[in-house]
Amino acid sequence: MDKKGINRDEIFEKLSKFQEKDLTHSSGRILGSMCTCPHEVGREAYSMFLESNLGDPGLFKGTKELEDESIRILGSILGKEDVCGYIITGGTEANIMAMRAARNCASISNPEIIVPKSAHFSFKKAADILCLELKEAELDENYRVDLQSVEDLISDKTVAIVGVAGTTELGKIDPIPELSKLCVEHEIYLHVDAAFGGFMIPFLKESSYDLPEFDFSLDGVCSLTIDPHKMGMAPIPTGGILFREEKYLDVMSIETPYLTEKKQSTIVGTRAGASAAATWALLKYMGMDGYISLAERCMEVTKLLADGIKKIGMELITEPELNLVAFRSDEMSVDEMASKLEKKGWAVSISSYPRAIRIIVMPHIKKEHIIEFIADLRQIII
Ligand code: 0PR
């Protein structure tokens, strides 16, 4: 560290230089990210609550109310208003918390969890941290989890089954009603990872899209991940974890004798109250109508992209169910295509199963970006 500090202006000049090297979502060039430009209402709410720490909620009673109300509102769009839960850092923390609750509830030795092959890698972290054996279920021809494969993996050590509502790589929705039935029959904890789909599916359903049930309206669903920092447009880091009943929090609570709350069920101690404030502000500001039209707009742009890809003779991996399009071409490898697109200034990502170019049509991607992208893509393959 330097002995003397440097002045404020110089600091910010230097910071700008670093920032210039970053890509920005607002350029419309980031096509492979599940994050987006945070909404200005969320930004302002976030910056208002920078000193608030939900790890000691007795000191920040107002922020705690914002968190509780956010959880209630999220519950109300997800089939059960009286859920419990927290606004946390994101999908990874949410999934780890859910697996911890499931493991502690079951309290058996050598516990196992069953996740679809398409599940996010955060479950591998959860398995490692919590000493769980991870069993991966196969997918069907539409890249949704295969129910028979899940059933075949169930053993007397199974403590949780996971379904994904909006998979990371392809945006597919697993058959959650069937998983719920299976879990009720076998008395196994069911967690739904709707980190991505949670802010899309309820609103698309309101807007006449025919999508399956995936939330607490299904008896078997014990917990659900929903990330405001993805399709909710909140600043990073803002995740959500919801539990059907308080007992799931109790099994992982730790005593915190000198704090204003006597027990803590979250993994993280000091927690950003700003994330809860931003979530509350956006839920209130957008309302059902705001999120419905956002979801509809993303789906329209998704359709434009999918149609454009087909028109230039490329193959969609699967029909998009949410705002995610994955495709490939017979003419060129996926890696070569990605690197040529990068040279033209497009930041795409590559899905691993199957290997394909993967584009998530987040709110920062507009029709004009897609038109420009398709034109570049056509040029690349001719
Ligand atoms: N569950 C699902 C279904 C996800 O898609 C993700 C992340 C997670 C859990 C974990 O969430 P956190 O990253 O909030 O802990 N999905 C994105 C992905 O891995 C995250 C992301 C976002 C990655 C933007 C890159 C990026 O530029 O692709």
Image: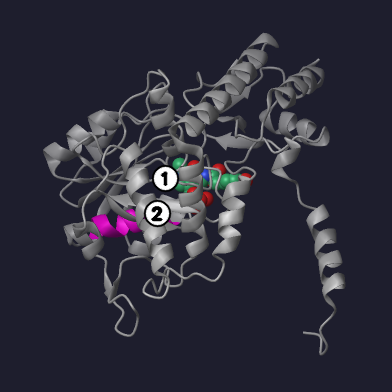
Q: Main secondary structure of the magenta part?
A: helix
Q: Are marks 2 and 1 in contact (CB under 8 Å)?
A: yes
Q: To which quarter of the image does residue 252 belong?
A: bottom left
Amino acid type at image mark 2:
Ala
- Asked if the residue at label 2 sits under 8 Å from ligand 1, the reply is yes
Residue 189 located within the stretch drawn in magenta? no
Amino acid type at image mark 1:
Ile
Question: Where residue 94 is drawn, which disc sits there?
Answer: 2
Q: Quadrant of the N terminus?
A: bottom right
Residue 271 locus on image (x, y percent): 46, 67
Q: CA distance from mark 2 to mark 1?
A: 8 Å
Residue 255, placed above or below residue 84: below
Residue under the image location 82 percent in, 60 percent down: 16
Counting labels gives 2
Which secondary structure lies at badge 1?
loop
Which residues are the magenta region? Answer: 93-103
Q: Nearer the viewer, residue 194 or 11?
A: 11
- Asked if the residue at label 1 sits under 8 Å from ligand 1, the reply is no
Residue under the image location 43 percent in, 63 percent down: 63
Question: Where residue 226 is drawn, which disc sits there?
Answer: 1
- Locate residue 132 relative to residue 300 in the image: left or right: left
Residue 226 locus on image (x, y percent): 41, 45
Considering only order in the chain, which callout, 1 or 2, is on the residue closer to the N terminus? Answer: 2
Neighbourhood count class around disc 1 (C-alpha, 10 Å): few under 14, some 14–19, many 20 upward: many
Residue 37 locus on image (x, y percent): 65, 44
Q: To which quarter of the image does residue 308 belong?
A: top right
